[in-house]
Each structure stands twice: as structure tokens, then as C-alpha cells.
């Protein structure tokens, strides 16, 4: 029986802030967008590489909630750049301002309790990443709305072995993402009352 669940609220959420950018977002109409786009994709590719042990990219949304790319195979950087650039231009026409944003979703390589043992699995949407340009910084949000990362499920059942492996992998990924953005976690919280800190689930 599957004991872990998805919830309508965030079980855990972390916001990583980059170092300062020379650009101020949103960009005013008519501003050259080539260098800001280059900087955004540099951070995006570095973040996806940093999360690669845990996260397999399968779809992209912009704005969050509208899927612009979806694939059963790993999406390629050239494809990502092309589709996001087109989507940002469409959004800029609507809002009269240009702000690069993307939500990255897919599969998470994690462990699940199966009978008396623990097995590796690829779980859809156990973790999502969202990178947005805001002011003179980039904000990367990691969000999970499942308790599969915890050593004890929210319902109370034990998940110590799988949860410990998953929480450790998540903590390592957060550290790598901080390095990828040349920044650090500035906010973290749980809407489900789960103990949480800057390094993951505590």
C-alpha cells in the first residue's frame, strides 16, 4: 500500500537568491534583451545541471500553469532556449515589460518503501523548480508537495529508511543549487507544519 501522498499545500519550499545582476527586471520596452537572456540561461542551465542527480526535466511552464514544452525524453538546451524566448516575447507584449521566468517540472529520482525493502523510483512532480528574474536578482524556488522526503509520513507512518535517503539527496541538491546561483537560501517554509531548515527537512 502506498503511504506517501501529494498535498494541495507545500510540504517544503526553499527560495535561493542569486548574487546581484547588472540588469534590473522587468526590463523596459525597447531594452536590448540579448545579454539578460544570456545571463538567465546561464543560471538556468547551471541549476538544472546541479539538480541532475535528483531531477529529470520533462516539461516547462511559462507562466507557471501554462505548459510550453513537454517531452518523454530529456529536453535539450537549444530547445529550451528557443521556446522560452518566444514565450517571454509573448508575455512582454501582454504586460509591456520583459521578465524571464520558467517553471521546470519532471521526474524525481528518489527512494520508496516497497514491502519490507526500499527501492529507487522515478516519481513525477515530487519536486519542481521555478527560476524568475526579480529586481536585480534571480530567485530559484524548489517546491515539493509530497511527504515522500520525510522519515515519518504526515499521516504518521514510518518512512525512516527511504525518507532519510530522500532527505539527504534533497539537502545535497540544495547545496549544489546555492553554488550554481552564487547565492544562498533566503526563505524556507512548510505549509504542512513539517520541520524545515535551509538545508532541507530537519
Image (tube, rainbow, N blue to C red):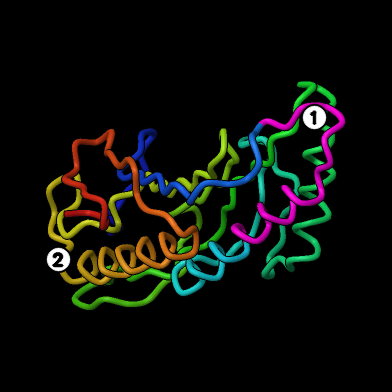
Left or right: where does residue 193 sit relative to residue 71?
A: left
Residue 176 picture location, percent across and down: 41, 67
The quarter of the picture where the C terminus appears is bottom left
Left or right: where does residue 98 sit relative to residue 176?
A: right
Total numbered circles: 2
> Range of the magenta residues?
26-44
Extreme residue toward the front, this view = 22
Q: Nearer the viewer, residue 53 or 15?
A: 15
- Residue under the image location 12 percent in, 48 percent down: 156
- Residue under the image location 26 percent in, 57 percent down: 199
Whether 66 is drawn above or below 34: the answer is: above
Q: Nearer the viewer, residue 62 or 43?
A: 43
Q: Quadrant of residue 149?
A: bottom left
Contact, mark 2 vs mark 1 (Cβ under 8 Å): no
Residue 10 picture location, percent across and down: 35, 38
Please check the rendered image and state whether residue 32 is part of the magenta-colored stretch, yes or no. Answer: yes
Query: Which residue is label 1 attached to?
Result: 92
Left or right: where does residue 39 sit relative to residue 164?
A: right
For label 1, the crowd category at 10 Å Cα-Cα, with few meaning under 14, some 14 to 19 and many 20 or more, is some
SS type, badge 2? helix
**Residue 7 image label:** none
For label 2, the crowd category at 10 Å Cα-Cα, with few meaning under 14, some 14 to 19 and many 20 or more, is some
Q: Nearer the viewer, residue 160 or 74?
A: 74
Give how far apart the Cα atoms at labels 2 and 1 are: 47 Å
Query: Which residue is label 2 attached to?
Result: 160
Left or right: where does residue 38 sit relative to residue 154?
A: right
- Residue under the image location 49 percent in, 53 percent down: 125
The quarter of the picture where the N terminus appears is bottom left
Residue 194 picture location, percent across and down: 19, 43
Foreground: disc 2 or disc 1: 1
Amino acid at each position: 500500500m502506498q503511504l506517501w501522498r501529494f498535498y494541495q499545500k507545500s510540504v517544503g519550499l526553499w527560495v535561493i537568491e542569486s548574487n546581484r545582476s547588472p540588469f534590473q527586471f522587468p526590463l523596459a520596452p525597447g531594452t536590448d534583451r540579448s545579454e539578460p537572456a544570456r545571463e538567465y540561461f546561464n543560471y538556468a542551465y547551471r541549476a538544472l545541471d546541479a539538480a541532475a542527480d535528483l531531477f529529470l526535466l520533462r516539461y516547462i511552464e511559462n507562466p507557471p500553469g501554462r505548459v510550453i514544452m513537454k517531452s518523454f525524453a530529456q529536453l535539450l538546451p537549444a530547445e529550451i532556449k528557443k521556446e522560452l524566448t518566444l514565450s517571454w516575447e509573448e508575455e512582454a507584449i501582454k504586460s509591456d515589460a520583459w521578465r524571464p521566468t520558467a517553471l521546470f517540472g519532471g521526474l524525481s529520482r528518489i527512494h520508496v518503501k516497497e514491502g519490507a525493502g526500499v527501492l529507487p523510483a522515478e516519481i513525477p512532480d515530487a519536486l519542481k523548480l521555478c527560476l524568475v528574474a526579480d529586481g536585480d536578482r534571480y530567485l530559484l524556488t524548489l517546491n515539493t508537495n509530497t511527504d515522500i522526503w520525510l522519515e515519518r509520513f504526515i499521516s504518521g507512518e514510518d518512512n525512516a529508511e527511504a525518507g532519510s535517503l530522500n532527505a539527504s539527496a534533497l539537502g545535497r541538491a540544495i547545496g549544489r543549487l546555492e553554488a550554481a546561483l552564487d547565492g544562498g537560501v533566503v526563505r524556507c517554509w512548510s505549509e504542512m507544519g513539517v520541520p524545515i531548515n535551509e538545508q532541507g527537512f530537519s
